[in-house]
Image (cartoon, grey):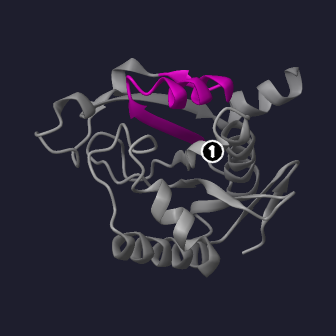
Amino acid sequence: MTPIVSGRLILRNWEDRDRELFHLINSDERVMEFYPFRLSRAEADNLLDKWRRELDDTGLGLFAIELAESGACMGYCGVKHPNVMPHLPKETIEIGWRLAPSFWGRGYVTEAAAQMLRYGFETIGLPEIVSFAVGANRRSTAVMQRLGMRRDEESDFDHPRVPETHPHLKRHVVYRLAAEDWRRGRTAG
């Protein structure tokens, strides 16, 4: 797959040099505040390998975000099938992200996500992209809003993979962006 270059960032497939950072963002308490599970190093390595294959095979998935200036891997952003049926239909594509805390607050996620929207709408030809998060996750919902996504309260759902032991993490809010609205927003600006 061809990397996507955006100003300060390079969105690319995963490499072996990313393994430590990948484990960090999937086990750090701050990053994982709104997730019920933390990954061991072996689990993180297996997931990285799976995501690498998915990107190579389909072009859909979660891309590594690299800081162009230094080559440091910061986290991920991408578009993929969320697999939360029946809450969202099988053909739904979501945009998601995760970033190491040392890179928070600098607009990197919004920049990466804007490129992933372009990729999803222009390259893949998606009609719509959704995003969802625990309602209390203000950092993520703020990114959704900055991207021009709109809240769809009727689609909010209790995440099927969040265990009953974490009731405060079950309810997820849904945001949507149609390709037509994305194009209109790009021409209006």
From what the image shows, is residue 132 above or below residue 3?
above
Image quarter where the N terminus lies is bottom right
Q: In which quarter of the image is residue 134?
A: top left
Lateral position of residue 95 relative to residue 121, left or right: left
Q: Does the magenta stretch include residue 129?
A: yes
Lateral position of residue 134 relative to residue 145, left or right: left
Per the image, the residue denoted by label 1 is 102
Q: Provide residue 81's location: percent of width, then percent of height.
A: 45, 55
Q: Quadrant of residue 102?
A: top right
Q: Is residue 152 magenta?
A: no
Q: Nearer the viewer, residue 186 or 131?
A: 131
Q: In which quarter of the image is residue 158?
A: top left
Lateral position of residue 173 relative to residue 37, left or right: right
Q: Which residue is drawn at 38% across and 71% down?
A: 41
Q: Residue at x 86, y 20 (%)?
A: 188
Q: What residue type is labelled 1?
A: Ser
Is residue 15 visible in this depiction of the protein? no
From what the image shows, is residue 115 above or below residue 23?
above
Q: What stretch is highlighted in magenta?
A: 128-151
Density class for disc 1 (Cα within 10 Å; few <14, some 14-19, many ≥20) is few
Lateral position of residue 112 relative to residue 69, left or right: left
Q: Residue at x 49, y 54 (%)?
A: 25
Q: Nearer the viewer, residue 73 or 141?
A: 73
Q: Provide residue 137's location: percent of width, then percent of height.
A: 43, 28
Q: Provide residue 150's location: percent of width, then percent of height.
A: 56, 22
Is residue 50 visible in this depiction of the protein? yes
Q: Provide residue 17's location: percent of width, then percent of height.
A: 63, 77
Image quarter where the C terminus lies is top right
What element does badge 1 sit on?
helix
From what the image shows, is residue 182 above or below residue 94?
above
